[in-house]
Image (tube, rainbow, N blue to C red):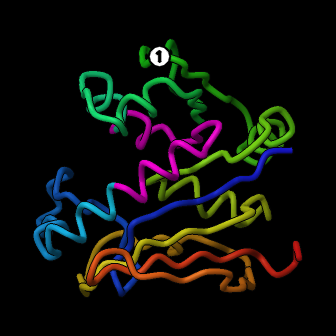
Amino acid sequence: MGKLVVSENVSLDGVMQDPRGDEGIGRVDWFTLIGERDRQEWAAALIAEATAAEAMLLGRRSYEFFAQRYPSRRDALAERINSMPKYVVSATLENPRWSNTTVLGGEVATAAEKLKDEVRGEIVVYASGGLVPALFDHGLVDELRLMIYPCVLGAGRRLFGGTSTVQPLRLVESRTVGDTLALLTYRPTVRE
């Protein structure tokens, strides 16, 4: 059975929206707030995570964001993401053009449960603010990895702004990435 891993960049106040400033919501590029060593170690951690994953699961908007940027990139992360199987939960996306992409229609929980049954290994979810709360609400997340940026943004979409259930979690690992980032790994306590 697959392991569903949510991996997100978040500010200290829980904002996950637009860390690079690409969406034009008027916030700063978070990478300008950290040093070069932080950026290098963040990139190494992201490449290691993508390399360990068997597949990606994305919501439609996140899929479109990645699909616009990664097919033309030629770095280690892009090569891994471009080659791996990608699954998109969407009722509107048809005929995806990004290689190795499958659209999962229907209800989110059913699609994610089926995917977990079919994929062996980690299925990583990146930057999917609409999908993540639904996965948590249905008890489908096996691990949560938060890369915490040392800033308070005050506004923007928060990772857990839309959950409807209480989900107790247990910290299973914490480590510093670079000089100022913190990587926190949690697992639901009900699965232990």
Place of residue 149 in the rendered image (x, y in percent of width and height, measured from the top left):
31, 78
* 5 lies above or below 155: above
The quarter of the picture where residue 151 lies is bottom left
Name the image quarter holding the N terminus: top right
Tally of marks: 1
Query: Foreground: 122 or 169?
Result: 122
Place of residue 105 in the rendered image (x, y in percent of width and height, measured from the top left):
68, 29
Q: Which residue is mark 1?
A: 99
Residue at 27% x, 83% y: name it. Answer: 180
Residue at 18% x, 66% y: name it. Answer: 31
Place of residue 120 in the rendered image (x, y in percent of width and height, measured from the top left):
79, 38
Residue at 26% x, 82% y: name it. Answer: 179
Query: Foreground: 51 or 103?
Result: 51
Range drawn in magenta: 44-65
Q: What type is the residue that disc 1 sits on?
A: Ser
Query: Foreground: 6 or 59?
Result: 6
The quarter of the picture where residue 30 lies is bottom left
Residue 58 on the magenta span: yes
Residue 54 on the magenta span: yes
Residue at 50% x, 12% y: name it. Answer: 95
The quarter of the picture where residue 90 lies is top right
Magenta span: predominant SS is helix
Please rate how many residues cluster around mark 1, counting C-alpha atoms within 10 Å: few if below 14, some from 14 to 19, many from 20: some
Place of residue 106 in the rendered image (x, y in percent of width and height, measured from the top left):
73, 33
Residue 165 shown left or right of residue 39 in the figure: right
Asked which secondary structure carries label 1, the reply is loop
